[in-house]
């Protein structure tokens, strides 16, 4: 969805609450990633690289199996390895920088909307079946993080973490969630703590 489409849909629907996530949020999430052991992260990226290489090699394998003319395996490897490295780099980048700094959250009439500058994520209130606010310490002060348990399009639950700028915004968000009959779920854990 383009930003102009997003702005149009937001204007046509009443906005009950809007905020921009605080600057500490991306630094906090990055510190969580960096604090994890290096070897498992490297192994996970290496496994991602191997899977990319396998997927890229499927056309060559198909041509070889049916006996059609194909490139020599070494020539194909020289092409497949840089492409796999390229995709692996972007996979690593997503883990190294898990949060964008310019995230805007809106509580609309139909649900919660998260806008990343070019991408919008929406959660309808009826698909939210739990919320909680946690207060991790970072940089000498407590951050306020709103956790929302939602369902994917396949019905699997997952937790969304949204940083709140202050206690007043937290109180307004909690009030709106109560009005929309989203239950409080104090057992929620942040997505970065789930195995």
Image (cartoon, helix red, strand yellow):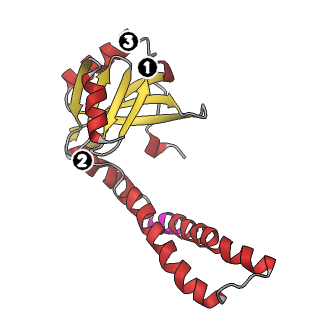
Numbered disc in front, either 3 or 1: 1
Q: Is residue 42 located in the magenta-colored stretch of the structure?
A: yes
Tell me how far mark 2 sits from mark 1, CA to CA: 25 Å
Q: Is residue 53 located in the magenta-colored stretch of the structure?
A: no
Q: Residues within 10 Å of mark 1 (few under 14, many from 20)?
A: some
* Viewer-closest of 22 and 15: 15
Q: Residues within 10 Å of mark 2 (few under 14, many from 20)?
A: some
Residue 85 in the image, given as x and y percentages of width and height: 47, 74
Residue 165 placement, left or right of 194: left
- Secondary structure at numbered mark 3: helix
- Residue 70 vs 59, above or below: the answer is below
- First-in-chain label (3 vs 1): 1
Query: Quarter-wise, where is residue 179 in the image?
Result: top left
* Viewer-closest of 123 and 62: 62
Which residue in the structure is indicated by mark 1?
Answer: 125
Identify the residue at the far front of this view. 68
Query: Quarter-wise, where is residue 162 in the image?
Result: top left
Quadrant for the N terminus in the image: top left
Tell me how far mark 3 sits from mark 2, CA to CA: 28 Å
Tell me how far mark 3 sits from mark 1, CA to CA: 11 Å
* Viewer-closest of 86 and 24: 86
Which residue in the structure is indicated by mark 3?
Answer: 178
Residue 116 placement, left or right of 94: left
Query: Quarter-wise, where is residue 54 in the image?
Result: bottom right
Which residue in the structure is indicated by mark 2?
Answer: 101
- First-in-chain label (3 vs 2): 2
- Residue 132 vs 152, above or below: the answer is above
Numbered disc in front, either 3 or 2: 2
Residue at 60%, 71% in the rendered image: 56
């Amino acid at each position: 969805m383009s930003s102009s489409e997003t702005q149009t849909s937001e204007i046509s629907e009443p906005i009950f609450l809007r905020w921009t996530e605080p600057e500490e949020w991306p630094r906090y999430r990055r510190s969580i990633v960096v604090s994890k052991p290096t070897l498992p992260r490297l192994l996970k990226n290496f496994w991602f690289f191997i899977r990319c290489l396998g997927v890229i090699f499927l056309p060559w394998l198909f041509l070889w199996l049916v006996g059609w003319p194909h490139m020599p395996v070494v020539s194909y490897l020289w092409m497949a390895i840089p492409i796999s490295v390229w995709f692996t780099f972007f996979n690593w980048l997503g883990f190294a920088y898990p949060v964008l700094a310019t995230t805007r959250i809106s509580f609309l009439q139909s649900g919660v909307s998260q806008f990343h500058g070019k991408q919008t994520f929406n959660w309808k209130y009826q698909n939210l079946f739990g919320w909680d606010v946690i207060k991790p310490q970072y940089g000498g002060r407590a951050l306020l993080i709103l956790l929302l348990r939602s369902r994917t399009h396949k019905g699997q639950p997952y937790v969304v973490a949204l940083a709140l700028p202050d206690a007043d915004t937290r109180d307004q968000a909690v009030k709106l969630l109560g009005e929309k009959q989203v239950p409080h779920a104090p057992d929620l854990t942040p997505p970065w703590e789930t195995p």
